[in-house]
Amino acid sequence: MTDKTGFSRRDYLRLLGAGAAAAAATTAADHSAFGAAPIYDQSAEDRIRRMKWWHEAKFGMFIHWGLYSILGRHEWVMEMEGIPVSEYEQLARRFRPKPSPAREWAQLARRAGMKYMVMTTKHHEGFCLFDTKTTDYCAPRQAAGRDLVREYVDAVRAEGLRVGLYFSLMDWHHPDGARCQFDEAARRRFVDYTHAQIRELMTNYGKIDILWYDVPWPLDVGGWESERMNEMVFGLQPDIIVNNRNDPQKQMGDFFTPEQRIEAAAEGKAWEACMTMNDSWGYHAADDAWKAPKQVIRNLIACARDGGNYLINIGPEADGSVPQRSVEILNTVGAWMDKNGRSLYGADRCQPTRCRFASFSRRGATLYMHVHFWPGETVALAGLMNRVKSARLLATNENVKFEQDDYRVRFTGLPVKAPDAPITTIAIECDGEPKQDQYFVRRRERGQV
């Protein structure tokens, strides 16, 4: 495909390759002509207000859905297989989802115990699932014939969940998407195009709770005019929260977004681990590397323990159907959350971590011991520096007997087999914020304390 300037797909691919090498060396000085923007920062008080619900929510659903779902080989298929724009864009004529699949997603999210959802409105392929005046390469003016973001927003609200919109800054379809790095006229066109689409998303769908930027290649903060971008967003949606990915240095925004790993941000910094349920974000028919429900729950606990959120992904098929394995996993997680979710929603950062068969979360002075490898009739916890006041099985509210000395707490008289699946949670009421000294026992035995 060649545009009116004579810029061909071959030129585009050449620039992609050149840009990948150059991007690492790009600095703010490279865009001095664009005007370096200061780092955008809402007041601490306003951020606390806007993010209160998000810190309490802990658990959300990510949805990657687009033309790549037709091919069923991951959402990067266009790039990874070198598919030309002129060939790839024909998929828009085949993308005909079934009626309102987002209703199924939202119902599944609610059953799983999730409190918010984030859907791709435009992924790197450049195809818009929303109604836009900027391009005809969008669902309403292609085979789908309707605004799929509108359907999604309405479905999420109907289930009482918070609405999040994902937007990729990188765009493989737009002719200026790569050359904007080297050509100021192209940069001006592409940045205006991008800002206009974000404005539409922030204007046309009522209250939006999250804007989830992704992949700022090939520009820097100054090139994207990210300060102005965020000012526009907050001007239109004063209660919204935004992530940090419209800044290559990831210093802007309200929360950090480690991908495919659980990595807590510094104390006082908000963060959210986003992960796939198998190894792919978009639908991949052959990807069978599914996480077990127990692993999903353990990941959620790990995020809550360290003050973060867990955003786990589904990759619907082209018609919007959720792969059956994803449904099964999330239904199992949801059944567990029905009984144990109170240990995670609104959880505080938790200092105790040391155990080979359990993980921890806390709310106030209550320590939740999540036993994922059940040891039998006695469960022991070493080095707890608090006095235990009471203990119970969270799922059934049954009291648990315990005995405590200077070294450990032993919870006794428990069933031989785990009383809950896939993880059993013991709620431990302490005489203050739970603290564990990982080395107390070893020092005490060696006469060091």
Image: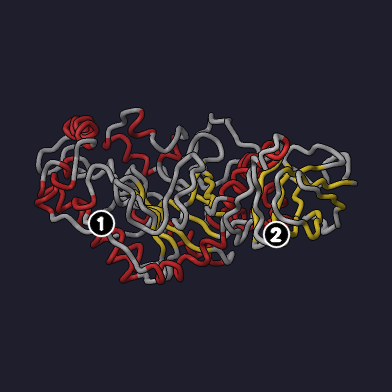
Looking at the image, what colour scheme do you see? secondary structure
> Distance of mark 2 from mark 1, alpha carbons?
42 Å
Query: For the point 68% across and 62% down, which residue is it?
Result: 432
Image quadrant holding the C terminus, namely top right
Instruction: Give the x, y percent position of residue 129.
Output: 39, 53
Image quadrant holding the N terminus, namely top left
Instruction: Give the x, y percent position of residue 175.
Output: 20, 43
Foreground pick, 105 / 400: 400
The relative height of residue 212 versus residue 274 in the rendered view (above or below) is below
Q: Earlier in the sequence, mark 2 or mark 1?
A: 1
Left or right, 414 with respect to 347, comes to: right
Foreground pick, 338 / 353: 353
Q: Which mark is residue 337?
A: none
Query: For the point 84% across and 38% down, which residue is it?
Result: 376
Q: Residues within 10 Å of mark 2 (few under 14, many from 20)?
A: many
Q: Amino acid at mark 2?
A: Thr
Q: Residues within 10 Å of mark 1 (few under 14, many from 20)?
A: many
Tag 1's secondary structure?
helix
The relative height of residue 279 versus residue 180 in the rendered view (above or below) is above
Instruction: Give the x, y percent position of residue 350.
Output: 60, 53
Q: Amino acid at mark 1?
A: Ser
| Closer to the eye: label 2 or 1 | 2
Q: How many marks on residues?
A: 2
Q: Which residue is mark 2?
A: 366
Query: For the point 65% across and 52% down, which residue is it?
Result: 435
Tag 2's secondary structure?
strand
Foreground pick, 26 / 183: 26
Q: Which residue is mark 1?
A: 226
Residue 9 visible, this orientation:
no
Left or right, 64 with respect to 299, comes to: left
In which image quadrant can residue 379 be found?
top right
